[in-house]
Amino acid sequence: MLCLDNHFKQFIDDSDFVVMKSFEFEVASIRSSHQPIKFFKLTDKYGHATHVVLKRDDYESLINECPSDDSIFILEMKNKGVYAEAEVSPDPENDWIRVFEGAMIGEVTPSFKEKNKGSYAKERRKLESLGIIGERYGKLTLLQEHTFENYSEAACILSGNSLNGNDVWKDKDGKSLKERGLGLKRGQSKANRNY
């Protein structure tokens, strides 16, 4: 399965190198079982990575070596640079969600700090202090796989926003957990789910 169906790539003449957009490279790196060791970042005048140059063999392995799994859900917020892939519990009575290493994490918003003074903001600070959240390639990243207690906890901590996890985690077809019958509907207890 291809990690990215539609993405920018430019082969450099007859050389062994390929240029990719930095964000697309990061997404493919999360999804792929192949991790390129050597690559170069191209930056804009502000020092932000815009493109990545890597060897053609690494590019082909990165793009072509992705697992296919219907239990994978994605949290994506392009405006904040947030991208995470996760596996959800197969047990409908449990809402745990295992987020894969390499998830790109958003900066905390003022409203998140205000609304979540106790729970999610505290948990995020804990994950940062434990080194589970930190910088990689100049971007705030989940540095190791982590299992969250529920969908909203994962979405809020990773995005730095107050979000309903049932609505924002989506499968490859764009259907939310709620639409797939996996998430809780607003005001519904676990015991009263519609399956």
Image: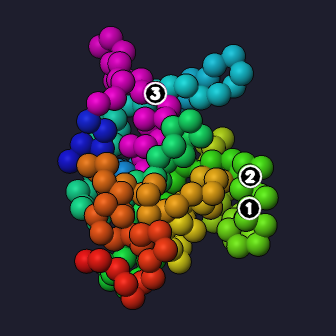
What residue is at 45 percent from the left and 55 percent from the top? Answer: 168
Q: Which mark is residue 111?
A: 2
Q: Nearer the viewer, residue 182 or 56?
A: 182
> Tag 1: residue type?
Lys
Q: Which residue is mark 3?
A: 21
Q: Is residue 161 above or below residue 80?
A: below
Q: Residue 85 lies in what quarter of the image? A: bottom left
Mark 3 / mark 1, whichever is N-terminal: 3
Left or right, 13 with reference to 165: left
Asked whether the viewer can see residue 135, the reply is no
Q: Which residue is mark 1?
A: 115
Question: Is 28 included in the stretch rendered in magenta?
Answer: yes
Mark 3 / mark 2, whichever is N-terminal: 3
Q: Residue 192 lies in what quarter of the image? A: bottom left
Magenta stretch: give its range.
Answer: 6-30
| SS class, disc 1 | helix
Using a 10 Å C-alpha cutoff, classify the residue at mark 2 as few (fewer than 14 neighbours), some (14 to 19) or many (20 or more).
few
Q: Nearer the viewer, residue 162 or 86?
A: 162
| SS class, disc 2 | helix
Quarter of the image where the C terminus is located: bottom left
Instruction: Give how far apart the Cα atoms at labels 3 and 1 are.
Output: 35 Å
- Position in image of residue 44 (x %, y %): 63, 19
- Name the residue furthest front: 187
Q: Are marks 1 and 2 in contact (CB under 8 Å)?
A: yes
> Tag 3: residue type?
Lys
Question: Is 139 included in the stretch rendered in magenta?
Answer: no
What residue is at 33 percent from the left and 11 percent from the top? Answer: 13
Q: Which mark is residue 102?
A: none
> Tag 2: residue type?
Ser
What residue is at 63 percent from the left and 57 percent from the top? Answer: 162
Instruction: Give how far apart the Cα atoms at labels 1 and 2 are.
Output: 6 Å
